[in-house]
Image (cartoon, grey):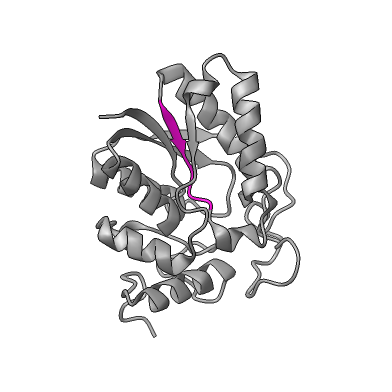
Amino acid sequence: MKGQAVVLLSGGADSAAVLYLARKQGYAVRPLIFDYGQRHKREIRSALSLSRALGAKPVVLKISLPWKGSALTDALLPIPGKRTRGIPLTYVPGRNIIFLSFALSYAEAVGAKAIFIGAHTEDYSGYPDCRKEFFDAFKAVKDAGTKYGKKIRLKMPLLRMNKAGIIRLGSELKVPFDKTWSCYKGGKKPCGVCDSCRYRAKGFKEAGVTDPLVTGCK
């Protein structure tokens, strides 16, 4: 084992692939799941299910944001059906800054060697906290603002991959995609209309892999 690794786990296909990749690379994974006041708890249940499937013990951290400003945290804002130019309405202000700060504190407290996050290129175009520039800046904060931060590696293994590549990687790692959830809406089945569903469908199609969540759906 390479030691412990804190893995940010949302319950989606990307973070699931990162969770399994971290384990394959020899880390004892510590999934970190956030309950931040999102519209539904479906993704949290998926994250817990993924953790159990891998035999990992997750930490669920409740940090419900008292402010809104995002379609993912404000039920009064509509979930966009298609991404438009600029930063999408599903952007949660400062989310990765918040999440990584907690992950860094957790990693330092337990002596973890790495932090894994599933940000990737297709998020880059819309979310400012999924850019390489952001992660480079956070690395500098990590090194300068903590006692042992220089010993903790910040790993973004999917950063330059597209969705199809991530699905292929997940398939190779035998990620149980039936336990994942990507839809911005809750419910028993993905809506198939929101931006996240569209990207997921495109990724599975281009990867030549059947998505178990939509098999048999019309």
* Residue at the image point whose x is 53% and y is 34% from the top: 62
> Which quadrant: the N terminus?
top left
> Which quadrant: the C terminus?
bottom left
| Residue extent of the magenta highlight | 113-119
- The residue furthest bottom is 218
Residue closer to the observer: 140 or 193: 140
* Residue 192 located left or right of residue 136: left
Q: Give coordinates of residue 3: x percent, y percent.
A: 32, 26
* Residue at the image point whose x is 65% and y is 21% from the top: 144
Q: Give coordinates of residue 206: x percent, y percent.
A: 41, 77
* Residue at the image point whose x is 33% and y is 47% from the top: 21
Q: Is residue 203 magenta?
A: no
Marker count (numbered): 0
Residue 141 vs 35, above or below: the answer is above
**Quarter holding residue 195:** bottom right
* Residue 157 located left or right of residue 73: left
Q: Can residue 189 be seen in this snapshot?
A: yes
Q: Give coordinates of residue 196: x percent, y percent.
A: 54, 66
Q: Can residue 57 be seen in this snapshot?
A: no
* Residue at the image point whose x is 53% and y is 27% from the top: 104
Residue closer to the observer: 18 or 195: 18
Q: Give coordinates of residue 24: x percent, y percent.
A: 27, 44
Residue 185 vs 82, above or below: the answer is above
**Quarter holding residue 208:** bottom left
Q: Is residue 117 magenta?
A: yes
* Residue 98 located left or right of residue 217: right
